[in-house]
Amino acid sequence: AFWTPVSSLPSSRCARTPAWRRPSPTAPSRRRPTPRRRCKEMRRVAAAARLGAAVSAGGAAAYSMPLSDWFAQPAPSLEAESLVSKFERDPEWVNCTTKLLSGAGMDVDSLDGSVIFDTLGARTNSIRLYHLYAKRDGTAVAGIASLGSGLDGHPGIVHGGVTALLFDNTFGWANAIGLLKERGALAAALHGPAKPALMRRGSNSPPAAEGPPGQQVSSTSQFGFTAFLHINYRAPVYAGTTVELLCALDRVEGRKRFLKGTMHDATGTLLADGDCLFVIPRGPG
């Protein structure tokens, strides 16, 4: 019969429901997953994928690679390739990372311990690419960074602290390049072998001004420290995005050096902007 007799079933709402409307016990649920359930499922899948990759290649060391191999990686996406090509082909810009290292008689392995190049780069590949370009006249520095997995704050969105880290580091290079220009050492650093007296043993920073004979010149005394860093977050930075940072000196007040910068994605969308202050320490005496 189309209707199930009430007398043959327990007294319940199911007994009064037509058989064709009753859910099958083997049919999948038609309920749509809530956003919270989707996020939990995404995190579970991502964690399982990371665990599987680590176990299959021997644990945490699976992510580690030599710095030279990390630098030699191809651009991880078309947008990254496009941004890198824009600066590589522009004669007004020069890859200052490799130029300054080679000019100092150093190689990329000297960046061991760097939070971006080494810890988040070669050791984890969370940052898959980070290239720094200086304008030949020393007025600006650009940074191209490809952000992979393992950098999330909210699921799928890069943590704001990573954005601040990229700004701070790129600001630091812009400050150093500006100081090299003011000291007349930029051309030698970018276009030819730098003088041994301008190098500092064990330093990951650009060459500094010449110090007293026989005395090592530290990067902190020459280029200073970040005194404050202010970031305005304009739009989410999603995992997998390649960003372009552009930082330049704004003004100088004695030992205080103020810089401004922006961060855009490959489409030109403004993701963040900020400003910072670097302070050069007082000399001895």
Image (tube, rainbow, N blue to C red):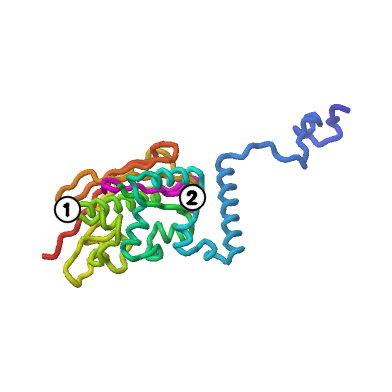
Question: Circle 1 sits on which residue?
Answer: 255
Q: Residue at x 23, y 55 (%)?
A: 180
Classify residue 262 by image quadrant: top left
Q: Residue at x 40, y 47 (%)?
A: 88
Q: How many marks?
A: 2
Mark 2 or mark 1: which is in front?
A: 2
| Residue closest to the eye, 21 or 140 | 140
| Residue closest to the eye, 89 or 121 | 89
Q: Is residue 173 magenta?
A: no
Relative side of 40 to 235, left or right: right
Highlighted magenta segment, given as a residue range: 136-160
Which residue type carries mark 2? Ala
Estimate the x, y position of residue 44 in percent, counting from the top left: 59, 51
**Element type at mark 2:** loop
| Residue closest to the eye, 181 or 263 | 181
Estimate the x, y position of residue 31 in percent, counting from the top left: 66, 37
Question: Circle 2 sits on which residue?
Answer: 75
Please, which residue is most extreme toward the left here? Answer: 285
